[in-house]
Structure formats: C-alpha cells, structure tokens
Amino acid sequence: MNPTYAMHEVLEVHEIAAFKTVCMTKSKTMQALVTDPELKLILQQDAAMSSDQLSELAAILTKGKETLQ
C-alpha cells in the first residue's frame, strides 16, 4: 500500500526538515567552539542523528512529491 499525502502534510514535513537542517548546522558549528569532550560528543551524536532524520524526511518528501503530481 502506497501512502498518499495531502499538500499540508508535505508542507509540514518540509518545515520539520528545514528546522532539523538548522539544528544540525548549529551542532556541527558548535563542535568547533566546544572544549569539553563530553559536550563535543553529545554534539557529534546530535549531528549524526539529525543527518539520519533528514534522510528519512527526504524520503517522505520524495513520496509526497509523487503523490501531488
């Protein structure tokens, strides 16, 4: 079964993806400024998790484009 998405759902996922991109950028940028190794590790994990989540959101957006056409 292929899910279909309404326009507002695709737009909401797009907003979440934009927010996660900002979060990942901030985590990666802050890694260079942080001296505490534990905090640096947390930021690295957050950036990696955000990257994985963005991949999942991209897949949803791709499916969303297909259903809107």
Image: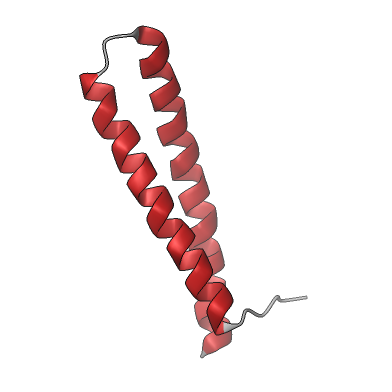
Report which quarter residue 7 is drawn in. Answer: bottom right
Residue 46: % across, % down: 45, 32
Residue 42: % across, % down: 44, 21
Name the residue nearer the viewer: 32 or 63: 32
In the displayed image of the protein, which residue is found farthest to the bottom? 69
Q: How is the image coloured?
A: secondary structure
User: What residue is shown at x 55% (from left), y 79% (from top)?
Assistant: 8
Name the residue nearer the viewer: 26 or 61: 26
- Against 10, residue 51 (above or below) is above
Name the residue nearer the viewer: 39 or 58: 39
Report which quarter residue 33 is drawn in. Answer: top left
- Against 3, residue 30 (above or below) is above
In the displayed image of the protein, which residue is found farthest to the left? 33
User: What residue is shown at x 27% (from left), y 17% (from top)?
Assistant: 34
Residue 51: % across, % down: 44, 43
Left or right side of 23 for 65: right
Count of numbered badges drawn on the protein: 0
Which image quadrant: the N terminus? bottom right
- Against 40, residue 51 (above or below) is below
Left or right side of 19 for 7: right
Left or right side of 18 for 35: left
Residue 44: % across, % down: 40, 25
User: What residue is shown at x 48% (from left), y 52% (from top)?
Assistant: 55
Report which quarter residue 23 is drawn in. Answer: top left
User: What residue is shown at x 71% (from left), y 76% (from top)?
Assistant: 2
